[in-house]
Image (spheres, rainbow, N blue to C red):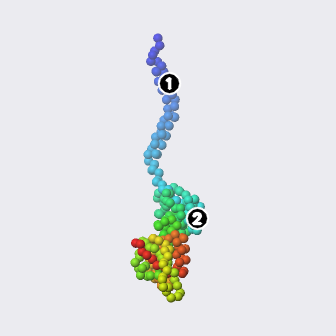
């Protein structure tokens, strides 16, 4: 009669012989696993990194930045320069204040800071000589003004004055320089600096050569 317990017994004996045969290799494998586990346990975690913007090529300061001028680079967090631009910074249209080399991390110190930029893309700062210094004395940075131009004349006053022309409307005052100087047609005046578009700047320059500029204050 066949012993019903003999097949499992034979299997156990075969497994025992197999383990005995390869016990050194198995022991070595287990020792290696233990060593790797110990190394992983004591190894410090990877240093944190930050993604910043760097020049993708040599750049000069002759024009505004484009989307192809900068690239994202990862750096160890403790190696990131102060003021470095984060990877998600919107840089299109910004300008450099000096040339940079390829690979240089771009910081806020490398960017020109046009005073009119907060008021919209493409806005420029425009000096305006206002004929009435008293009106300028009512202004401060942040005031909003309309600039008007009245044509000058060489002869006696006409019986009926021509109306002034509005050159720009509702523009913010960026600065009111303390120093007043004589300038512009018809005598002295005071200087203010406003934010305007390049087209408005050209219009103001044209009117300033033949007109007296005045302001109305919106706020």
Structural crowding at the residue carrying mark 2, measured as other residues with C-alpha within 10 Å and reported as few (<14), some (14–19) or many (≥20): some
Kindly indicate whether the residue at mark 2 contacts the one at mark 1 (C-beta within 8 angstroms).
Answer: no
Residue furthest out toward the right: 58
For mark 1, what is the residue?
14
Q: Nearer the viewer, mark 1 or mark 2?
A: 2
Across and down, in percent, residue 159 comes to: 48, 85
Q: CA distance from mark 1 to mark 2?
A: 74 Å
Most foreground residue, 36 or 209? 209
The answer to whether any part of residue 39 appears in the image is: yes
| Picture mark count | 2
Q: Position of residue 177 (x, y in %)?
A: 45, 78
Of 41 and 177, nearer the camera is 177
Give how far across and how far down residue 80 sits, in percent.
48, 60
Q: Is residue 138 left or right of residue 117?
A: left
Q: Which mark is residue 59?
A: 2
Specify whether residue 113 is in view. no
Answer above or below: position of 207 versus 36. below
> Residue at position x 43%, y 79% from top?
136
Check disc 2 and report its element: helix, strand or loop.
loop
Q: Position of residue 218 (x, y in %)?
A: 41, 72
Q: For this rendering, which residue is in front, 22 or 49?
A: 49
Q: Residue at x 54, y 70 (%)?
A: 199
Disc 1 is placed on an element classified as helix
First along the sequence among labels 1 and 2:
1
Residue drawn at 44 percent across, 82 percent down: 132
Quadrant of the rendering where the C terminus is positioned: bottom left
Extreme residue in the bottom direction: 156
- Few, some or many residues within 10 Å of mark 1 (<14, 14–19, 20+): few
- Residue at the farthest top position: 1
């Amino acid at each position: 009669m066949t012993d019903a317990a003999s097949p499992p017994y034979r299997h156990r004996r075969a497994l025992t012989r197999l383990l005995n045969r390869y016990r050194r290799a198995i022991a070595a494998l287990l020792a290696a696993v233990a060593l790797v586990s110990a190394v992983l346990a004591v190894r410090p975690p990877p240093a944190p990194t930050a993604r910043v913007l760097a020049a993708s090529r040599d750049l000069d300061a002759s024009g505004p930045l484009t989307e192809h001028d900068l690239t994202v680079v990862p750096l160890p967090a403790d190696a990131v320069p102060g003021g470095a631009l984060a990877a998600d910074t919107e840089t299109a249209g910004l300008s450099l204040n000096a040339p940079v080399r390829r690979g240089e991390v771009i910081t806020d110190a490398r960017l020109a800071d046009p005073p009119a930029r907060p008021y919209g893309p493409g806005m420029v700062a425009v000096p305006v000589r206002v004929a009435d210094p008293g009106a300028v004395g009512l202004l401060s940075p942040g005031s909003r003004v309309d600039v008007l131009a009245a044509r000058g004349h060489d002869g006696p006053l006409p019986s009926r004055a021509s109306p002034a022309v509005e050159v720009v409307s509702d523009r913010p005052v960026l600065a009111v320089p303390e120093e007043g100087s004589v300038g512009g047609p018809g005598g002295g005046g005071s200087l203010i600096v406003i934010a305007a578009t390049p087209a408005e700047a050209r219009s103001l320059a044209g009117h300033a050569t033949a007109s007296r500029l005045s302001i109305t204050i919106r706020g």
